[in-house]
């Protein structure tokens, strides 16, 4: 069993609060991704678990064992660093065997474990080489191999794909997911890339300024973000946000966004009644805005007229950068669209998939299942 | 007519002749610089070559003609001067003394400085930064200012017993141990500064990875830090070796016993007694240069690498 528990964990560096009252339970065999912008505390949270930083307040458990004062080498975890941290003067074999050698594991056992790990990762031919003779992807595999031979209770990975080119990153993401399934061990993965988080995680923990914003499965975070930050961070391109005022009563309820208005679906009325006459933040993902000329609109479609500023052709879709009376927003539309820069276009907002957040707290209003 | 592809047209234009012309132009552009550098090298080497040639000439030849005349009559060259210096003037013993003084002084500095530099770079302890600052501040203290206090201290602490095998006293003035410690102390500030900067430039991830693998500070030092620090350590070894090998002042003050005198001291005495006998002096000088030249050429590729890594990344 390798559950990991953060219990009111805080880490302070002089006056800077890097991790603030962090509470999280990670199940055995889970692939949990800590995601957030630079400086949000995700790497610090990982390093606290690894034992590379001292906890200021709170407790960390690995299984049932409190590990606050347990040295890093005794926590039964293995870490893969962003820079791989391979020992440049040692061969690949010696890099992978180093930890086992220090633990006085018998030589035959070391040889067996290194061979097995090398086979899993496809690096059997590289065992005699030095790290400088390897490509970035190969070094990354060696770093993984060094962790695998330890047979730890949990793998900690600190942005291991950051140094790879885009194509290799996509390939390696899939390989990491397969590796996780094959090893059946807890993976705790840190990244700033929400695409990595969405594609690999069983659960995602979003952090900002040392605080945990939301934890949940990727689809849950996508469909039901609990606040503006999570809504804007998860999903690419990012969600469009508009300052809106709730106007009208019941059947006439609509969101007034200065230059345009959108009707509130009946299912939302009760949630928004307390905010009648008040400012709220209206969110709409680009993929929920369509060009009705090439895609049938949804049943709760709200038309909006806007000027096309820029078009980005992706092949499978087109990103439209639009302006509605000085308010910029993006739409992800069918590639058959005839929209061109400088043209006025009518797009449709799928109001069944709208998101609304309180202006003051930025917390989500009326979280619901997305059908 | 098909339109020409600009990229294939550009490739076809670089014929061997054009490439050769471009290379020739580039070399010609650098010719004045190369000529100037070669000229300077030759100019600076002339006195040394002159001394070397003179060391193989007889006294009468040196007195009667310039050194360049030796080229006309190479069979007149002789190794007698070297024989005289080594056998009759005690230069062989002085060479041995120089080695005995220099090698342990160099090794001690590297050992102590490496430990200290690792602690300053990667370990946390109270007043770490203050201690390092004090260590660096010692760099500005002239050696000459410390000689009298050190001499007084050594005189008070002299242990008169003879050191077996090597000779000299066990400690104090006229002792190998005393001069080893003196040279080590004089060399430590720079050595610690250089190595601390180099160790500090090693990636933190390497250390953390080693700690996670189960390595103690001792293991990390010997298995990770030292192997990766060979350029800096080699540079330090060259510096310290040359500094101690060429030292006259410290040996003059702390080594009273003529049997323990290194080559610098011996040559200085030869100047007093054989002031105009250039054949003796030049051969003595070249004997003293031999080993440092070997050391330097053996480790020279680490020299610049080590200095830059220690200085620039600091």
Image: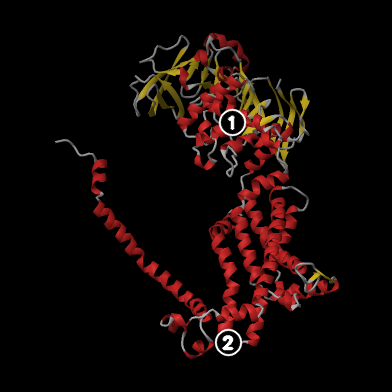
* Circle 1 chain: A
Query: Mark 2 falls on what kind of element?
Result: loop
Query: Residue at label 1?
Result: A145
Q: Is residue A39 above or below residue B115?
A: above
Q: Residues within 10 Å of mark 2 (few under 14, many from 20)?
A: some
For the N terminus of chain B, give its image quadrant. Answer: top left
Looking at the image, which is closer to me, A190 or B220?
B220
**Closer to viewer: mark 2 or mark 1:** 2
Image side of residue A231 versus residue B219, left or right: left
> Residue A276 placed where, x, y %?
59, 17
Q: How is the image coloured?
A: secondary structure
Image side of residue A230 versus residue A9, left or right: left
Q: Is residue A55 above or below residue A319?
A: below
> Residue A233 placed where, x, y %?
55, 27
* Circle 2 chain: B
Q: Residues within 10 Å of mark 1 (few under 14, many from 20)?
A: many
Query: Mark 1 falls on what kind of element?
Result: helix
Image side of residue B271 versus residue A348, left or right: right
Residue A169 shows in the view:
yes
Q: Are marks 2 and 1 in contact (CB under 8 Å)?
A: no
- Cα distance in 3D space between marks 2 and 1: 70 Å
Taking the spot 50% from the left edge, 21% from the top edge, the residue there is A285
Looking at the image, which is closer to me, B5 or A104?
A104
Query: Residue at label 2?
Result: B277
Q: Residue furthest left?
A: B1
Total count of labels:
2
Residue B136 shows in the view:
no
* Dots 2 and 1 on the same chain: no
**Residue B82 position by quadrant:** bottom right
Taking the spot 54% from the left edge, 38% from the top edge, the residue there is A128
């Amino acid at each position: 069993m390798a559950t990991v528990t953060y219990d009111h964990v805080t880490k302070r560096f002089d006056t800077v609060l890097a991790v603030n009252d962090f509470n999280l339970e990670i199940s055995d065999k889970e692939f949990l991704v800590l995601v957030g912008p630079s400086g949000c505390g995700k790497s610090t949270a990982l390093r606290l678990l690894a034992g590379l930083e001292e906890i200021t307040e709170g407790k960390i458990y690995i299984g049932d064992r409190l590990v606050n004062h347990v040295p890093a080498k005794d926590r039964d975890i293995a870490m893969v660093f962003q820079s791989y941290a391979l020992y440049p003067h040692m061969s690949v074999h010696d890099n992978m065997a180093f930890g086992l050698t220090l633990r006085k594991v018998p030589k035959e056992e070391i040889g067996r474990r290194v061979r097995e790990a090398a086979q899993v990762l496809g690096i059997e031919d590289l065992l005699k080489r030095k790290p400088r003779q390897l490509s970035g992807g190969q070094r990354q595999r060696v770093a993984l191999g060094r962790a695998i031979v330890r047979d730890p209770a949990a793998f900690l990975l600190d942005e291991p794909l950051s140094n790879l080119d885009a194509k290799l990153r996509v390939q390696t993401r899939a390989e990491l997911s397969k590796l996780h399934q094959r090893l059946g061990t807890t993976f705790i993965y840190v990244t700033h890339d929400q695409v990595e988080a969405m594609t690999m995680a069983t659960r995602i923990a979003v952090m900002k300024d040392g605080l945990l914003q939301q934890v949940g499965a990727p689809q849950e975070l996508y469909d039901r973000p609990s606040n503006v930050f999570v809504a804007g961070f998860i999903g690419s391109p990012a969600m469009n946000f508009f300052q809106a005022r709730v106007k009208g009563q019941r059947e006439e309820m609509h969101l007034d966004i200065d230059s345009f208005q959108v009707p509130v679906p009946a299912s939302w009325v009760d949630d928004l009644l307390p905010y009648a006459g008040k400012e709220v933040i209206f969110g709409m993902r680009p993929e929920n805005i369509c060009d009705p000329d090439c895609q049938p609109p949804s049943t709760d479609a709200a038309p909006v007229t806007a000027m096309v500023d820029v078009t980005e052709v992706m092949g499978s879709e087109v990103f439209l950068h639009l302006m509605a009376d000085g308010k910029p927003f993006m739409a992800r539309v069918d590639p058959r669209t005839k929209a061109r820069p400088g043209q006025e276009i009518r797009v449709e907002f799928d109001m069944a998939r709208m998101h609304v957040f309180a202006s003051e707290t930025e917390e989500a209003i009326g979280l619901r299942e997305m059908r | 007519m098909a339109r020409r592809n600009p990229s294939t047209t550009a490739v076809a234009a670089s014929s061997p002749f054009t490439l050769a012309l471009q290379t020739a132009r580039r070399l010609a552009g650098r010719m004045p610089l190369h000529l100037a550098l070669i000229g300077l090298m030759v100019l600076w080497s002339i006195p040394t070559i002159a001394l070397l040639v003179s060391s193989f000439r007889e006294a009468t030849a040196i007195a009667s003609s310039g050194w360049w005349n030796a080229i006309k009559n190479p069979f007149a060259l002789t190794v007698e001067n070297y024989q005289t210096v080594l056998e009759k003037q005690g230069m062989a013993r002085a060479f041995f003394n120089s080695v005995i003084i220099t090698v342990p002084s160099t090794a001690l500095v590297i050992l102590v400085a490496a430990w200290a530099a690792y602690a300053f770079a990667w370990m946390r302890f109270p007043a770490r930064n203050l201690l390092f600052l004090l260590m660096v501040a010692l760099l500005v203290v002239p050696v000459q200012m410390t000689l009298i206090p050190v001499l007084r201290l050594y005189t008070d602490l002299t242990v008169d017993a003879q050191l077996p095998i090597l000779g000299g006293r066990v400690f104090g003035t006229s002792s190998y141990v005393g001069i080893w410690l003196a040279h080590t102390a004089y060399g430590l500030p720079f050595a610690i500064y250089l190595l601390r900067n180099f160790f500090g430039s090693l990636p933190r991830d390497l250390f953390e990875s080693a700690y996670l693998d189960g390595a103690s500070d001792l293991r990390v030092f010997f298995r990770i830090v030292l192997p990766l620090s060979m350029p800096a350590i080699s540079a330090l070894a060259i510096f310290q070796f040359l500094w101690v090998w060429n030292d006259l002042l410290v040996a003059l003050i702390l080594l009273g016993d003529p049997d323990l005198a290194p080559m610098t001291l011996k040559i200085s005495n030869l100047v007093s007694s054989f002031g105009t006998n250039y054949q003796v002096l030049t051969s003595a000088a070249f004997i003293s240069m031999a080993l440092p030249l070997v050391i330097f050429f053996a480790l020279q590729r680490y020299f610049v690498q080590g200095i830059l890594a220690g200085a620039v990344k600091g």
